[in-house]
Image (cartoon, rainbow, N blue to C red):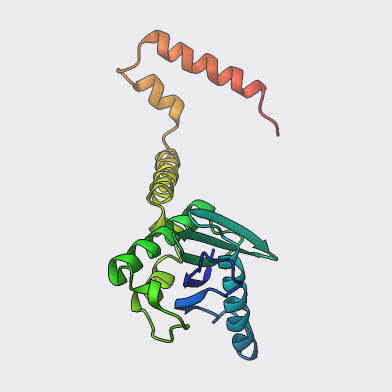
Amino acid sequence: MKITALLVLKCDSRSDGSDPVILANATDVSHFGYFQRVTVKQFIVFVGRTVAKRTPPDQRHSVQHEEYKVHSYNRNGLCVVGFMDDHYPVRSAFSVLNKVMDEYQKCFGDSWRTIQADSTQPWPYLNDALTKFQDPGEADKLLKIQRELDETKIILHKTIDSVLERGEKLDSLVEKSSDLSAASQMFYKQAKKTNQCCTIL
């Protein structure tokens, strides 16, 4: 899962054919060959402008291109575009775009509306976001919680296995347990017999 680029653009709602203006741009093309990097950056700018131009106000779009997805979100003419690989969760991608949009409006307000040319000034937050949100769990808290639950489940399985590895068989523990009634012990034994007939070797 990888984010290759994040762009913030001003999209003119007029239909005069003018291209969106780049307000901020952060890219990570380190996984491309050295001689490909300039071309990849130019392609990102081209595709970013094209997708932003075709994203109507207050809408979200996702465009598939080979193994990449380009996600865009246009909020009243301010558009954020993200280039993610195919494995990056869509929900996390749009969460990243929302966070970038909110932070841009918090930092710059409506000053972006008067900008007429591409900005070459770096915006440190965008570079930090590009690094921080490489892990989709940072963008989507539900995904992070799900991962933690999965890890807990793995630890629980390992714990039960380690108890059994110490030479204690679950059968002997059930027989020794004073917490289980005779009926519960009988149920355990019957369930074990039933499950054994269905085991595929």
- Along the viewing direction, whichever of 182 and 144 lies nearer the viewer: 144
Question: For residue 124, which quarter of the picture?
Answer: bottom left
Question: For residue 32, which quarter of the picture?
Answer: bottom right
Image position of 63 (left or right of 141): right
Where is residue 184 shown, x and y percent of the image? Answer: 41, 13
Where is residue 7 shown, x and y percent of the image? Answer: 48, 72
Q: Quadrant of the C terminus?
A: top right
Q: Residue at x 45, y 25 (%)?
A: 171
Where is residue 60 shown, x and y percent of the image? Answer: 53, 54
- Along the viewing direction, whichever of 71 and 183 lies nearer the viewer: 71
Q: Residue at x 40, y 47 (%)?
A: 142
Image: 124 above or below 136: below
Count the marks.
0
Image position of 178 (left or right of 64): left
Q: Residue at x 46, y 71 (%)?
A: 10
Where is residue 146 shown, x and y percent of the image? Answer: 43, 45
Image: 17 above or below 156: below
Image position of 41 (left or right of 116): right
Image: 89 above or below 79: above
| Residue with the most extreme bottom position | 35
Question: For residue 177, which quarter of the picture?
Answer: top left
Q: Quadrant of the N terminus?
A: bottom right
